[in-house]
Image (cartoon, helix red, strand yellow):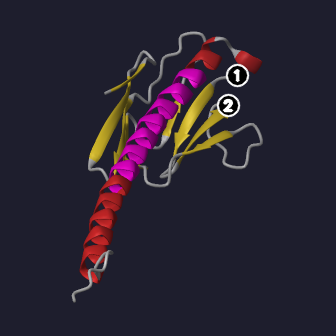
């Protein structure tokens, strides 16, 4: 007399759990990479939008002043006036995603500020800002032309 037992062996259960863990890990990695890519694109758009906003407000002579943008490692700040003052209450600071950093700021005359001229919207601090995501090994360059026009690639 032999008896037959229905069920799964321990080895079968361990193999199924290993396969499920592997699939979950691959899916999670894909999701994290996608999220970082989206944050990177959003940060690039934010930098371009803030530069365009500063230029537009300067050209419109909003509050009879000029506007500029200050770049730091993890923030971009829109400021009013002829120079950046970190303690000014009129500053609007926009933090970048923690995985994104502004790697290289190359502006004419040096420094970390772009200031637009009233009515014309031109700038003497033309140059580029390279935004880097170390985790993805991707960079984007935001170019500020002498005319004040901003472009990204």
- At a point 33% along the width and 70% down the height, the residue shown is 17
Nearest to the observer: residue 11 or residue 130 = 11
- The N terminus: image quadrant: bottom left
Mark sitting on residue 35: none
Q: Residue furthest left?
A: 1
The stretch in magenta equals 29-54
- Which quarter shows the C terminus? top left
Callout 2 environment at 10 Å: few (<14), some (14 to 19), or many (20+)?
some
| Position in image of residue 113 (x %, y %) | 51, 38
Task: Please state which of residues 94 and 22 is positioned toward the viewer in this rendering.
Answer: 22
Residue 81, numbered circle:
2
Pointer 1 or 2: first along the chain: 1
Q: Is residue 8 rendered magenta in the image?
A: no
Above or below 62: residue 141: below
Q: Relative to 97, is 57 on the left or the right?
A: right
Mark 1 neighbour class, 10 Å CA radius: few under 14, some 14 to 19, many 20 or more: some
Q: Please, what secondary structure does the residue beneath circle 2 have?
A: loop
| SS assignment for the magenta stretch, majority | helix
Residue at (39% x, 49% y) in the render: 31
Q: Picture coordinates of residue 138 (x, y %)?
A: 28, 44
Query: Would you say 99 lies left or right of 52 here?
Result: left
Picture layout, residue 46 above or below residue 94: above
Secondary element at image label 1: loop
Outermost residue, front direction? 1
Asked whether disc 1 touches disc 2, contact meaning CB atoms under 8 Å apart, the reply is yes
Residue 12 picture location, percent across and down: 25, 74
Q: Is residue 150 above or below residue 96?
A: above
- Image position, residue 40 (x, y; %): 41, 41
Q: Please name the residue that numbered disc 1 is placed on.
A: 65
**With 61 as the anchor, is 28 left or right in this view?**
left
């Amino acid at each position: 007399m032999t008896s037959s037992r229905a069920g799964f062996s321990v080895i079968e259960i361990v193999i199924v759990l290993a396969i499920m863990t592997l699939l979950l890990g691959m899916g999670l990695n894909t999701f994290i990479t996608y999220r970082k890519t989206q944050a990177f694109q959003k940060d690039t758009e934010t930098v371009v939008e803030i530069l365009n906003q500063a230029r537009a407000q300067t050209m419109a002579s909003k509050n009879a002043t000029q506007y500029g943008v200050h770049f730091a490692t993890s923030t971009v700040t829109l400021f009013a006036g002829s120079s950046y003052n970190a303690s000014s209450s009129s500053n609007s600071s926009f933090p970048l995603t923690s995985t994104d950093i502004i790697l290289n700021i190359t502006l004419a005359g040096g420094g970390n500020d772009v200031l637009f001229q009233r009515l014309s919207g031109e700038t003497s601090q033309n140059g580029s800002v390279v935004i880097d995501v170390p985790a993805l090994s991707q960079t984007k360059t935001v170019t500020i032309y002498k005319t004040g026009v901003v472009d990204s690639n």
